[in-house]
Image (cartoon, helix red, strand yellow):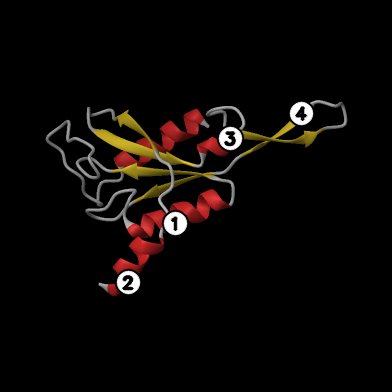
Amino acid sequence: IMTNVVQRLLAQRPRFRRELLTLKDGGTVGLDWAGEDQVDEKRNGVQQNNVNGNGEAKTTPKPVVILMHGLCGCSLSPYMLGIVNGIVSRGWIAVVMVARGCGSVKLTTGVSFTAARTGDFNETVAAVRETY
C-alpha cells in the first residue's frame, strides 16, 4: 500500500491526448498519446536533426513506444505514469492502448477486455504504424 501512495505522489502526470480507435468488430480502444508536443510537425513522426551535405533538412524517425496497461488499469495507473514519463523524457512518443471498457473507454460491443485476446493490440499496432 505504501508503495502505491509514494508512486502516486512522485509520478508526474504527462499530458495525454486521447484518440478513440474503432476496431474491426466495432469495439473501441483508447489511444492515450504523450510526448507528441516534442514532434516538430504534428503527427509526422520525425524530428529535424541538422542538414545533410546538400543543405536539405535531414529527418530522423522519432521512436514511438506502444504500451498496454494491466488488468483494471489505464494510462493514469501509477506504474504507467512512471513508464510514460521515462519514455517522454528521452524525447520519444508514448502511446498507451486503453482497453475496451477500461479507463473511461466505453464498451461499444458485447465483447469486453481480456488479456488473452491479442487482436485489439494487434490492430492498435497496425494503426500506429500507419500513422507513423
Residue 54 percent coordinates (x, y): 87, 26
The residue wearing badge 3 is 39
* Label disc, if present, on residue 97 of the rendered structure: none
Which label's residue is closer to the chain start, 1 or 2?
A: 2
Q: Which residue is mark 2?
A: 3
Q: Which mark is residue 57?
A: 4
Number of numbered discs overlaid on the protein picture:
4
| Residue at point 60%, 40% (across, down) | 62
Q: Residues within 10 Å of mark 1 (few under 14, many from 20)?
A: some
Q: Residues within 10 Å of mark 3 (few under 14, many from 20)?
A: some
Indicate whether 78 appears above or below 91: below
Q: Nearer the viewer, mark 3 or mark 4?
A: 3
User: For the residues marked 2 and 3, what is the alpha-carbon distance in whole angstroms?
Assistant: 34 Å
Which secondary structure, mark 2?
A: helix
Q: Residue furthest bottom?
A: 2
Question: Quick one: label 2 or label 3, which is nearer the N terminus?
Answer: 2
Whole-angstrom CA distance, mark 1 to mark 3, is 19 Å
Give the CA separation, mark 3 to mark 4. Answer: 15 Å
Mark 3 lies on a secondary structure that is loop
Which comes before the other along the chain, label 1 or label 3? 3
Q: Position of residue 11 (x, y in %)?
A: 41, 59
- Mark 4, residues whose alpha carbon is within 10 Å: few (<14), some, or many (≥20)? few
Name the secondary structure under disc 4. strand
Real-space Cα distance between discs 4 and 1? Answer: 32 Å
Pick the front one: 70 or 6: 6
Horizontally, is 44 left or right of 7 in the view?
right
